[in-house]
Image: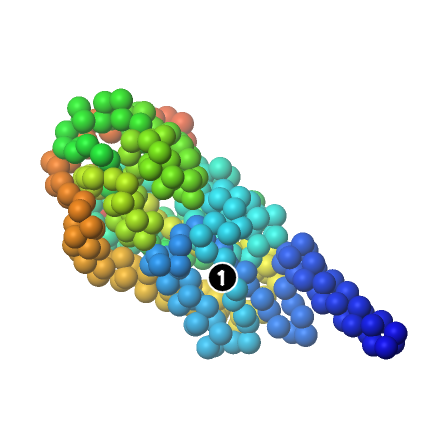
C-alpha cells in the first residue's frame, strides 16, 4: 500500500510539473515529443463570429498537421491589451485583438473615422503592401501580424436616438482605450469613457455609461439589446482585427509549419469576413425583434466633424502611409 501511495504521488507531481511548464514557460514549452501546441486567445464570447473563425483556424491547422490549437475566448486570459502583452512576452502564442497601438500607432491608422466606405475597400488595403507595412513595426515587440480577421464597421447604441451630431453632446459613451476612438468621440462632443469590453454589459445596465459603440455582431452576441434601446448605424469607424503570433514562436516552427499556419490564418480570415457580411442583415433583424429600434442617420455631418482626427494623426505620426492608403482608394 505504501509503494502504491508513493507511485500515485509521483504521477501527480509529474503531471503538475508538466502543466506548470506549459503555462508558465509559455512558448519555450510548446513542444513535447515533437507535438506543437498553439494557445490562441481572443476577447469575445463563444457565440460570436470571432470565436467561430478561431475555431475554423483550429480545424484547418489540425486537419493539415500534427499541431494542436487550444482556444481561450471571452477574455479568459485577460483584456485585449493583456493578451497582446502575453504574446509580446512569448507567454502566449496567438491573439486576435485590436489594441496594438500600445506598441506602435502606425497600425491604428486603419481606425481613422470614415477612412473606408465599404468592406471591399478595407480588405483590398489590409491584404496588400499597406497592411504589411502598417504591421511591420510590431515585430520589434515580438508581434508578427499574419492576417486580418474581421471586426466590421462600428455603430452607436444608446438609450436615446443618435441622429445628428448634437445628439452626442455630453453622451457618456464607452470606447476601447484607443487614442483614435477617444479623439473621434471628443470631436463629436461626447464624453468617451475607456473600459474593458468584459465590463461593458454591467456598466450599461447600471448606467455607469449611457452608450457604447461596436459592430453589430459584438452587440448581438453580448446581448446589449437587453440594456440599450436604440442602435444608430453611424459607421463611424472600420476596425480590422489583426491576428498576431509570437515572432519567437514563429521562428521556432519549420518552414512547412509556418506555411500551414499562414494559409490557415488567411483562410480563417476570409471565413470570418464572410460570416460578418452575410450575417449582418439577419443580426439587425434579430435585435429589432428583441425590441431595439434601428436608426439610419445621415452620416455626412459626422464625417465633417471628425476630419480633425485625420489631421491630428498626420501631425503626430506622419501622413506617408495615410497618403498611400488614400491613393490606393483613389481619394487623393
Q: Quadrant of residue 45?
A: bottom left
Left or right of residue 166: residue 249: right
Under circle 1, the secondary element is strand
Q: Quadrant of residue 128?
A: bottom left
Name which residue lies at 42% across and 35% down.
195
Mark yes or no: residue 187 visible.
no
Find the residue positioned furthest to the front.
1
Q: How is the image coloured?
A: rainbow
The x and y percentages for residue 165 are 18, 27
Left or right of residue 166: residue 55: right
> How many marks can you see?
1
Is residue 72 placed above or below 88 in the rendered structure?
A: below
Left or right of residue 55: residue 309: left
The x and y percentages for residue 64 are 47, 77
The x and y percentages for residue 73 are 46, 56
Picture quarter with the N terminus: bottom right
Find the residue positioned furthest to the right.
2
Name which residue lies at 33% across and 37% down.
205
Specify few, some or many for label 1: CA neighbours under 10 Å numbering under 14, 14-19, or 20 or more: some
Picture quarter with the C terminus: top left
The x and y percentages for residue 172 are 31, 27
Q: Quadrant of residue 179?
A: top left
Name which residue lies at 57% across and 54% down.
92
Instruction: Choose between 179 and 255: the one closer to the eye.
Output: 179
Instruction: Choose between 35 and 286: the one closer to the eye.
Output: 286
Mark yes or no: residue 60 visible.
yes
Q: Name the residue carrying label 1.
A: 71
Name which residue lies at 12% across and 41% down.
296
Amino acid at each position: 500500500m505504501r509503494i502504491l501511495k508513493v507511485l500515485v504521488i509521483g504521477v501527480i507531481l509529474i503531471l503538475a510539473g508538466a502543466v506548470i511548464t506549459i503555462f508558465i514557460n509559455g512558448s519555450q514549452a510548446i513542444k513535447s515529443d515533437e507535438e506543437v501546441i498553439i494557445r490562441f486567445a481572443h476577447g469575445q464570447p463563444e457565440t460570436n463570429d470571432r470565436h467561430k473563425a478561431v475555431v475554423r483556424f483550429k480545424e484547418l491547422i489540425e486537419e493539415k498537421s500534427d499541431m494542436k490549437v487550444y482556444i481561450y475566448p471571452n477574455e479568459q486570459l485577460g483584456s485585449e491589451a493583456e493578451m497582446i502583452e502575453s504574446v509580446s512576452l512569448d507567454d502566449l502564442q496567438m491573439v486576435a485583438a485590436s489594441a496594438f497601438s500600445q506598441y506602435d500607432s502606425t497600425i491604428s491608422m486603419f481606425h481613422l473615422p470614415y477612412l473606408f466606405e465599404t468592406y471591399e475597400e478595407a480588405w483590398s488595403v489590409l491584404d496588400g503592401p499597406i497592411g504589411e507595412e502598417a504591421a511591420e513595426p510590431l515585430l520589434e515587440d515580438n508581434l508578427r501580424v499574419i492576417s486580418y480577421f474581421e471586426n466590421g464597421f462600428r455603430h452607436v447604441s444608446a438609450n436615446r436616438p443618435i441622429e445628428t451630431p448634437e445628439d452626442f453632446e455630453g453622451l457618456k459613451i464607452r470606447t476601447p482605450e484607443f487614442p483614435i476612438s477617444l479623439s473621434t468621440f471628443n470631436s463629436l462632443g461626447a464624453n468617451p469613457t475607456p473600459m474593458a469590453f468584459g465590463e461593458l454589459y454591467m456598466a450599461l445596465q447600471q448606467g455607469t455609461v449611457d452608450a457604447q459603440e461596436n459592430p453589430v455582431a459584438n452587440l448581438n452576441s453580448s446581448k446589449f439589446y437587453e440594456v440599450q434601446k436604440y442602435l444608430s448605424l453611424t459607421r463611424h469607424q472600420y476596425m480590422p482585427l489583426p491576428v498576431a503570433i509570437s515572432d519567437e514562436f514563429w521562428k521556432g516552427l519549420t518552414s512547412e509549419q509556418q506555411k500551414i499556419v499562414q494559409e490557415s490564418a488567411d483562410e480563417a480570415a476570409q471565413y470570418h469576413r464572410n460570416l460578418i457580411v452575410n450575417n449582418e442583415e439577419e443580426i439587425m433583424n434579430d435585435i429589432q425583434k428583441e425590441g431595439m429600434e434601428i436608426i439610419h442617420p445621415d452620416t455626412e455631418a459626422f464625417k465633417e466633424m471628425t476630419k480633425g482626427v485625420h489631421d491630428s494623426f498626420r501631425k503626430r505620426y506622419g501622413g506617408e502611409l495615410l497618403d498611400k492608403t488614400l491613393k490606393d482608394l483613389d481619394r487623393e
